[in-house]
Amino acid sequence: MMRRTIPLATVVGLGRAVATGVAAGCANGSSATCQDACNAAHIAQCSGTKVQACSLMQSGCLQWVDMADCSLTGQTCDPATAACAGDCVDLCSTAGQSQCAGTTIQTCTAGAAGCLGWVAGHDCAGDGKVCDDTAGTAVCTGGGTCTAPPATPSGPAPADGATGVDPTTTTAVDWADASGATRYAAYLSTTCPPPAYPDAAFTTVATSRLTGLTLAAGSNYCWQVVAIDNAGCYTAGPVWDFQTATTCTDPVAGAPTVTSTDASYPIGTTSGSYSLTFSESVHDVATNLTWTPLTGTGTMTVTAVDATTYTIGFTGVANGDRYRLTVGTGVTDDCGHQLAAAVNRSITIAAPAPPGSTCADAVDLTSTTFPYQLTGTFDDDPAMGGSCDSSPTNAVWFKYTPSASGTYTITIENNTTTGAYSRLAMFAGTSCSPLGTELGCLTETGTDMVAEASLTGGTTYLILFHTDGNAYTMVDPSISIGKQTTGPGEFCGTAADVSGATFPYQLTGTFSQDPAAGGSCDTTPTNAVWFTYTPTVTGYYTVSATNHTSTAAFSRLAVFAGPSCSPLGTQRACVTVDGKTASTLVSLTPGTPYLILFHTDGDSYTMVNPSITITRETTGAGEFCTTAADVSSVTFPYQLTGTFNDDPAAGGSCDTTPTNAVWFAFTPATTRSYTIQAQNQTATNAYSRLAVFRTASCSPYGTQLACVTASSKTASTTQTLDQGVPYLILFHTDGASYTMVDPILTIN
């Protein structure tokens, strides 16, 4: 924003108004009659392209004065703000400065747009006074019309001419009340003599005392008091002075400190004592102690042992009581230095640990009514926890034996009144050391959690709920466990079986479950839907899922081998898509059930009426391991035509993440040394990898004979191959940014 400053002598106010041309008395209080063109000395208006300010002229009348011509900067005057659009005009120079406008005190103030302008404040005429800014600060005064001013201030303390005044204990000066005075203006400084009143160096006080002083040791001070009455009339007192003493010899420099710490007492304590200690000798301890029962009704007594140690006796306490001992700032050392700030110390009586405080004392929820709540604060820090947090803090333990197998929802909450991060882990069996097999471990950035677990009827499970650090507390935790009655696809345990379905297969409804685990491409799935599929034929399958939500959504699709939900089986694929449809190509084995997880990338997206299509792919020679091109009887060089983009799950030892792979199978007619060379005919650059395996097995591969890397499009190796033994040859690029086009294989 452009900013221009208007000289103070030019204008005395700025605001938004419309000129009224009202006739009025002179604004400076003159008895003559004059014509004011505007009615207040702190307003502005637009006049065409010009900004005008209502200003007090030497004649004593208010007139509109041109302040800025907006047209000179290609702008217009905005009537709403009375300023050039996009511009800022300062009508005074420093925020907080003051001046007189007639009998009114005006203050330089920043407006909403950041512009400085004069704002009218107190009108001295209302008190029968005049405004005086001759000293640089505008004040209301008697204006020289006083007939009975207040009495002259007297009775200074410290006395006039006093020496050896203690700077550590003298924090105020005072004087006798002056007859007729309703307030005072006081000056105290090492800069002497004082300036003539009125002056900004004087401090106005309502009583005959100036407090809040910090005096320097070994210094000469002068001070003066001015008595002021309701009419603004004042009488200045004489100038007094005193001298402070040199600094007291302090055995411990600076303010005293409390050196004792918080204390706790064992179960069964009904009375006892606490030793309150300080860094040096102190005074006024008993009168500056406060005993506050946070829980309990115990009381305290105070006994001085010596100048640095005090015994705080307490009686009437009970298990679980908590008290706060506050040491106030009125405690001082021998030199008068006060405690820098009030200090709190905690006095705690231990309470018996509530049920659930340890693994061995886990609360059995099998026959309870939910929700079930424990009462108390839990602070167990067990030696081990779940996989998501191996150092649990403030733990509470439960155990539960379901009567029937199924998927169960566990809802748990920490009822602490402060923030907390939470962890929930579940283990099969009741073993505490070591813990049993983990079913799952969930993290949350709040105080409540919802998890699901597949439980077996008659099996007992341990549930560990804890915080993420001792800075967080576990208070009055509550838990609910319920067996889910769900439709197909809502949970992993009720995945919709599409093995014999006609595709596309669609589920109806909105899916909002957030499972504890997902695939490697997104470990925090939201709004998940689950399918299961068991193929009848080995091959590559395209799995495609669509979210039919009417809003935007990002999608994630993962495939896992086996039916296990906790933990999930071996991941076969995990893909991310910035849209509502995700698909992946995956190799499947007949008779093996596969779990398919389809979900969104955040709870702000919804999963509505999801559909799935699974298609077995018909592939050409060399496109996949299972369709490797057999070159046992071909004439070399042998070339395949097309672009190959298979990214198999495993490769050779020289590159375990192959991309754009092409596959060959070769069974030699004789045993001898063979040179195997492969060339990528891509038109762009590419780095190559070539691996040879004994036997043509795809899952797993056979014994590796060679794995070579090349920083070009051609790779080769020489190996001894045995007659009649099948070999698998894998040729691929070093990254998805390279393409595999019309590869050529030569074996000689």
Image: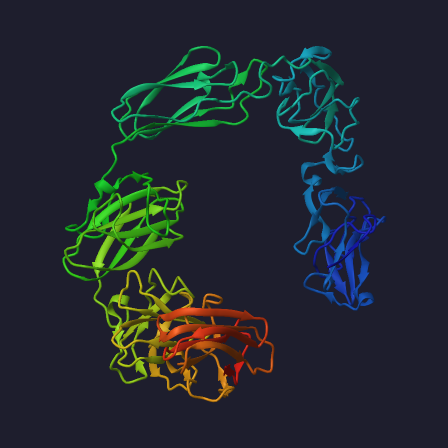
Measured from the top left, where is residue 303 in percent x and y?
40, 13
Q: Where the N terminus falls, by quadrant?
A: bottom right
Residue at horizontal 27 percent and vertical 52 percent from the top: 426
Measured from the top left, where is residue 349 in percent x and y?
31, 27
Residue at horizontal 22 percent and vertical 63 percent from the top: 484
Closest to the observer: 171 or 561?
561
Q: Quadrant of residue 88?
A: bottom right
Q: Residue furthest right?
A: 58
Q: Quadrant of residue 524?
A: bottom left
Measured from the top left, where is residue 181 in percent x and y?
66, 24
Residue at horizontal 73 percent and vertical 20 percent from the top: 223
Residue 311 shown left or right of residue 479 in the figure: right
Residue 582 visible in this rendered orientation of the protein: no
Residue at horizontal 14 percent and vertical 55 percent from the top: 458
Residue 570 shown left or right of residue 67 in the figure: left
Residue 286 shown left or right of residue 424 in the figure: right
Residue 720 shown left or right of residue 571 in the figure: right
